[in-house]
Amino acid sequence: MRFATRAVHAGNEPDKATGAVAPPIFMASTFAQDGIGRPRGYEYSRSGNPTRERLERAVADLEGGKHGLAFSSGLGAITTVASLLKKGDHVLICNDVYGGTFRLFNKVFSSFGITFSRVDARDGDTLSKAIRRRTKMIWLESPTNPLMVVLDIRSIAKIAKENHLLLAVDNTFASPYIQNPLKLGASISLHSTTKYVSGHSDLIGGALAVSDEQLHEKLKFLQNAMGAVPSPFDCYLVLRGIRTLHLRMEQHSRNAQAIAEMLESSGRATEVYYPFLRSSPYHDLARKQMSLGGGMLSFRIRGGYKAASRFLESLRIFVLAESLGGVESLAEHPGRMTHSSLPREERERMGITDDLIRLSVGVEDPEDLLEDVKQALDSALS
Ligand code: P1T
């Protein structure tokens, strides 16, 4: 079946007991057993819950994987994946990642003796040369947060395979409608379901999709052992969001493309980062690997921090807030907001400077969004 049909139906079969066409929310923490060691399918909701299981099946289906796992946050999912590693193991992380992901490896896992290094994963040779004896995993985002770098997942997956490394891809910015890392050879596809997958800015959640049975067993063990599981109610909300994922992503992408093109021709942005812009250095790769450009874009405003803050404070429809992927448009300053947990030199080395603005383009009317961005540019640069 095609994506739209799967988005509507995956994990959404009518309830066996009642025929309810919306998934029941099983709020129970524990389940009656017929005898000692004779559960009816569920024992305790940290280990398994029927509403969560529907979400896990839906995520697996949309990502083209065999198994899905749901978590209480994107970082809960990342923590669980990183817990596959042991003291002394090494991870290669692409240069540009969400600030919270960097902070987790830099401040938490490094104190457990897990080392990591940043790598320019755009270049296969650089990546191959960075692999050490104890390297166990490559960690990518594509497109990256916030600079929208597109990495060649298929080629990197080959390098990972040759070197017996796990390849984890944070697919949050693309969503499963636009990109499926498992189909390109990744071992794990990861989402902050807080974003496009749920799509309404009303919950925090995470998810993984995998196909390898052993890897799934290990991650399922860790999901239960570490306990970063979502509530059944949040699972219901994510499932509800998934039903319209394809419709939302089409509109997000149309709107973001229009804004990116307007910014580029406005003369008021020194750079615009959107993978489906013809001028993007990632255009050809993005067209191969992604079905649409998605709803995220970043740009550098002329006039530095002063203009950036005036722009952000002048917006009327875009809301100044962290996060992304909801139906409403958001705007933020990565240097002072989402990526402020990175040390300043690290941020600047990555290109997260004071003139950088990130937009999460929503599904509102494109003309209204274009007018809003134009009037905020006028205010910022007058
Ligand atoms: O917030 P949480 O659900 O825990 O997800 C963390 C996360 C993981 N991966 C990516 C690519 C992300 O962008 C995030 C969270 N990002 C933001 C809150 C943000 O505004 O960029």
Image (cartoon, rainbow, N blue to C red):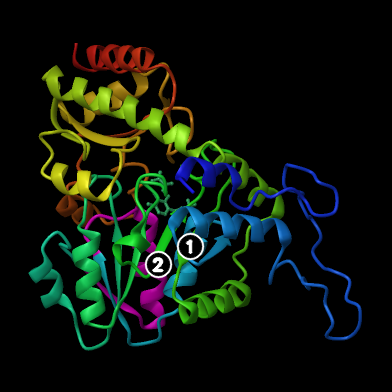
Q: Residue at x 34, y 53 (%)?
A: 98
Tag 2 and tag 1, C-beta contact below 8 Å: yes
Looking at the picture, which amino acid does disc 2 mark? Ile
Task: Determine which residue is flagged by label 2.
Answer: 188
**Quick check: 244 above or below 27?**
above
Residue 300 location, quadrant:
top left
Q: For residue 231, what is the image quadrant?
A: bottom right
Q: Nearer the viewer, residue 42 or 66?
A: 66
Which mark is drawn over residue 208?
1
Q: Specify start and end residues of the magenta stretch as a single range.
A: 94-118
Residue 101 horizontal/vertical position (percent): 37, 60
Q: How many marks?
A: 2
Amino acid at pointer 1: Leu
Upstream in sequence: badge 2 or badge 1 = 2
Looking at the image, residue 380 sits to the left or right of residue 232; the answer is left
In the structure shown, which secondary structural element does the residue marked by tag 2 occupy? strand
- Can the viewer see residue 279? yes
**In 3D space, how far apart are the residues under numbered discs 2 and 1 (Cα atoms)?**
7 Å
In percent of width and height, residue 375 lies at 29, 11
- Pick the front one: 157 or 78: 157
* Magenta stretch holds residue 363: no
Q: Give the image quarter of residue 335.
A: top left
Q: Is residue 117 one of those drawn in magenta?
A: yes
Question: What's the residue at 19%, 24% (across, down)?
Answer: 261
- The reply to whether residue 330 is in sight is no
